[in-house]
Image: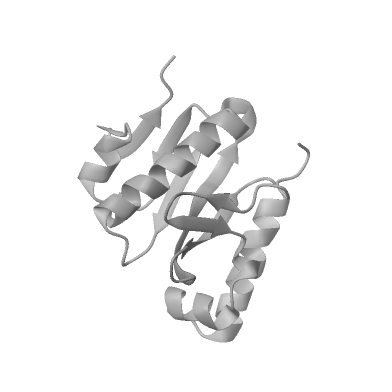
Amino acid sequence: MSSFEGYHPLLTPRFRFDWLTQFKLKNVATLTSQDLATAADWVNTTMHSTMNRTALTWGIERRQTHKLMGWGGFTDLEIPAHRCMLQVVGPKFTPTDQEEILRRLIAFGHDELQLTTLTLVDNHRLAQTALMAVGFQYEDQQWVWHAQH
């Protein structure tokens, strides 16, 4: 696929991942602790990176409540090298939520983008139990997931 346009929404049993532009700007601003103008700039920059295939970021909504809970996806995408950085941000995600979200992102990255190495951004935000449950290993002071060959 030449663009990432068709890569939304993604679903899990409890979450829907969709472009940040699909959520009310007020909710994005509240979640990111930004004013509306700054949040709008962030959404525009994030979506521009997605359209340029250098990142792939979704807002993460709890399906039952339709509440935007966080965001996540891939940054620093190096598709020819099969690697990228992975980020999940959501202050109210439980370790169980984190595991479900990580499993979906890993499966998508591996199956759709053929990524074989994912390095976690901001690893202090996620529970070690969730990271280890989905196959991340702590290497050189960072959490890294490698595809099993």
Frontmost residue, 55 versus 66: 66
Q: Is residue 58 left or right of residue 96?
A: right
Q: Position of residue 128 (x, y in %)?
A: 22, 44
Frontmost residue, 94 versus 139: 94
Rendered-image quadrant of the C terminus: top left
Please, is residue 137 above or below residue 5 in the view? above
Frontmost residue, 102 versus 34: 102
Examine the rendering and report whether any part of residue 141 can be seen: no
Q: In this view, does 73 lie to the left or right of 125?
A: right
Which residue ends up furthest to the right in the rendered image?
2
Q: Which residue is drawn at 73% across and 50% down?
A: 5
Rendered-image quadrant of the N terminus: top right
Please, is residue 127 above or below residue 46 in the view? above
Which residue ends up furthest to the left in the rendered image?
129
Q: Which residue is drawn at 44% across and 75% down?
A: 31
Q: Where is residue 146 in the image (x, y as percent from the top left)?
A: 40, 26
Q: In this view, does 36 lie to the left or right of 144?
A: right
Please, is residue 108 above or below residue 149 in the view? below
Q: Which residue is drawn at 32% across and 67% down?
A: 91
Please, is residue 130 above or below residue 61 in the view? above
- Count of numbered marks: 0
Examine the rendering and report whether any part of residue 76 can be seen: yes
Q: Which colour scheme is used?
A: one colour
Q: Position of residue 96 (x, y in %)?
A: 28, 51
Q: Position of residue 23 (x, y in %)?
A: 59, 72
Q: Which residue is drawn at 60% across and 84% down?
A: 37
